[in-house]
């Protein structure tokens, strides 16, 4: 039986002000044959978590990738699903994402109801997560798939209020997302204002392509940063993140 410890460990790290870093692996873009070599670099880095998921993923691709990853790392593997078909019992935990920045009921609650019959049958730690898509300078896959609009970067009050509403609704984690391949990451000002206003862990992802942007996110208040496309485009980024 898997222990339900992912969230407890995140809380402990936040309490100790330890920086958490997740690598996001998209089953639709990642070649499974590269898993061993890729995770050799991951294991030698400061990365603490592995997120697996994408906006559009072929059925069964997630399970195959998670199984391969588990053979090459002891890091916790957390599902970051774009759809119900990406749920796999082979992972350790699931970000149960509610797209609270949008107004599409399917991604606020609809997809979640679809997932329950599957989740009841498997032993997977479920982490209720308020997901906020922030304007990033380009139309992202999340915007296209969910048919929702991101929150404007300049409308700070709406972003802060939405994050706080997520906390009041009982979310255990807040996730500020600029989107895969974002031209601009979530700004330091947005991260700082949201972090000051909530009492739950804050994850920040999208558009972080270098060490300086990573440091900016941490300094502004991110408890965990997620990097995906930057590693896909340039694996030498790992050299800057060695233990």
Image (tube, rainbow, N blue to C red):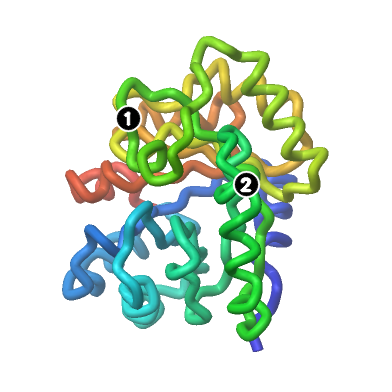
Frontmost residue, 160 versus 211 = 160
**Measured from the top left, where is residue 173 in percent x and y?**
67, 47
Residue 44 placement, left or right of 216: left
Residue 199 placement, left or right of 113: right
Circle 2 Cα neighbour tier, 10 Å, few/some/many (<14 / 14–19 / ≥20):
some
Picture quadrant where residue 223 is located: top right
**Measured from the top left, where is residue 33 in percent x and y?**
17, 75
**Measured from the top left, where is residue 59 in percent x and y?**
34, 73
Rounded to the nearest whole Å, what is the CA distance between mark 2 and mark 1?
20 Å
Task: Please tell me which residue is depicted at 59% across the width and 67% down the height of the picture.
Answer: 114
Residues at circles 2 and 1 in contact by the CB criterion of under 8 Å:
no
Q: Number of callouts in the render?
A: 2
**Considering only vertical position in the picture, is 184 above or below 181?**
above
Frontmost residue, 100 versus 231 = 100
Q: Secondary structure at mark 1?
A: loop
* Residue at the spot of label 1: 139
Frontmost residue, 192 versus 124 = 124
Task: Please tell me which residue is depicted at 20% across the width and 50% down the height of the picture.
Answer: 235
Residue 235 placement, left or right of 89: left
Circle 1 Cα neighbour tier, 10 Å, few/some/many (<14 / 14–19 / ≥20):
some
Task: Please tell me which residue is depicted at 54% across the width and 48% down the height of the picture.
Answer: 20
* Residue at the spot of label 2: 108
């Amino acid at each position: 039986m898997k222990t339900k410890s992912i969230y407890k460990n995140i809380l402990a790290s936040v309490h100790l002000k330890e920086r958490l870093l997740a690598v996001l692996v998209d089953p639709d873009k990642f070649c499974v044959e590269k898993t061993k070599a890729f995770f050799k670099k991951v294991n030698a880095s400061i990365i603490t978590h592995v997120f697996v998921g994408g906006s559009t993923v072929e059925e069964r691709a997630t399970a195959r990738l998670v199984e391969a990853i588990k053979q090459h790392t002891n890091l916790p593997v957390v599902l970051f699903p774009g759809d119900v078909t990406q749920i796999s019992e082979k992972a350790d935990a699931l970000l149960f994402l509610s797209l609270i920045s949008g107004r599409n009921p399917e991604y606020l609650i609809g997809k979640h109801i679809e997932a329950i019959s599957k989740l009841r049958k498997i032993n997977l730690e479920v982490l209720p997560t308020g997901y906020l898509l922030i304007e990033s300078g380009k139309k992202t896959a999340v915007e296209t798939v969910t048919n929702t609009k991101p929150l404007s970067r300049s409308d700070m009050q709406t972003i802060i209020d939405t994050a706080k509403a997520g906390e009041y609704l009982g979310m255990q984690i807040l996730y500020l997302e600029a989107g895969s391949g974002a031209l601009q990451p979530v700004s330091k000002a947005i991260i700082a204002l949201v972090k000051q206003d909530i009492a739950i862990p804050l994850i920040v992802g999208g558009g972080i392509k270098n060490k300086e942007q990573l440091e900016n996110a941490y300094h502004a208040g991110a408890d965990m940063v997620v990097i995906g496309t930057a590693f896909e485009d340039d694996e030498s980024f790992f050299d800057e993140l060695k233990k």
